[in-house]
Image (cartoon, rainbow, N blue to C red):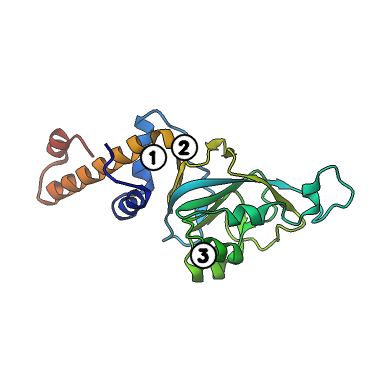
Amino acid sequence: MAIWKDDKELFSIAKKELFVALVGDVLDKLGYQHQFLSPQLKPVNNDFVVIGRAMPVLEADVFEEVVEHTNNPLMKKPFGIMFEALDSLQENEVYICSGSSPRYALWGGLMSTRAMKLKAAGAVVNGYSRDTNEILSLNFPTFSMGGYAQDQGPRGKVIDYRVPIEVDGVRVNPGDIVYGDRDGVLIVPQEVAEKAFTGAIEKARGEQLVKEALEAGMSTVDAFAKFGIM
């Protein structure tokens, strides 16, 4: 039985007691050893922490904003179905986008404003973000390769959402848990989320006991012998 009753309580516990590295360590022990995204993906503000359910978005490069003579009606829509994807965000979901080349920004200030209104948890884009000052003033947890002002309009379109994607070879399915802080972004597959977070919470609480023992003067040898954690 889970230590938490719902996602809201789990995410609250994670923000108060956990950090991303700890959950990654537990996933390693469970045999899930390739769940971190590229270390290039960083929070816009080092203090940002994101945790929520993945709402995957598939982006593709284009070379005109609107193509008149096309076999694909989507090519006539500026931004493809990005607005529909953004509007579909639900509370505690993370907009996570991949599929394009890093030639332009995949996230910005107005998108953050809309996502906040929908009570989304944050955004993780496998590319750049822009409107950095606006994102910082909104305090909306955004992770990207950094700031780059080049617009998506004539360069990229969202072609699908709520579908499986890959980021740096890591599979992201709708409903997986996205957990990120300044040390990295981790994808926790939903089928192992309960085990991973239960293990991480138990480890964090155990580490607190070890810390207190070390502060009281116990040796690391004795502490490891007693608690099995170091």
Q: Which element type, helix, strand or loop, lies under badge 2?
A: loop
Query: Residue 191 vs residue 115: left or right?
Result: left
Reading the image, the residue beneath label 2 is 35
User: Where is the C terminus found, in terms of image quarters?
Assistant: top left
Q: Give the crowd class for mark 3: few <14, some 14-19, many >=20 residues within 10 Å.
A: few
Position of residue 204 measured from the top left corner of the image (x, y, whole percent): 25, 45
Q: Residue furthest top?
A: 31
Report, in whole angstroms, how far the alpha carbon at label 1 lies from the one at label 2: 8 Å
- The disc labelled 1 sits on which kind of residue? Gly
Q: Are marks 3 and 1 in contact (CB under 8 Å)?
A: no
Report, in whole angstroms, how far the alpha carbon at label 3 lies from the one at label 2: 29 Å
Report, in whole angstroms, how far the alpha carbon at label 3 lies from the one at label 1: 30 Å
Position of residue 109 measured from the top left corner of the image (x, y, whole percent): 59, 66
Q: Residue at x 36, y 41 (%)?
A: 23
- The disc labelled 3 sits on which kind of residue? Lys
Reading the image, the residue beneath label 3 is 117
Q: Which residue is drawn at 55% across and 70% down?
A: 134
Q: Which element type, helix, strand or loop, lies under badge 3?
A: helix
Q: Which element type, helix, strand or loop, lies under badge 1?
A: helix
Q: Indicate the quadrant where residue 191 lies.
A: top left
Query: Residue 101 vs residue 125: left or right?
Result: right
Reading the image, the residue beneath label 1 is 24
Q: Give the crowd class for mark 2: few <14, some 14-19, many >=20 residues within 10 Å.
A: many
- The disc labelled 2 sits on which kind of residue? Gln
Position of residue 133 measured from the top left corner of the image (x, y, whole percent): 55, 70
Q: Which of marks 3 and 2 is nearer the N terminus?
A: 2
User: Where is the N terminus found, in terms of image quarters?
Assistant: top left
Q: Nearer the viewer, mark 3 or mark 2?
A: 3
Q: Residue furthest right?
A: 69
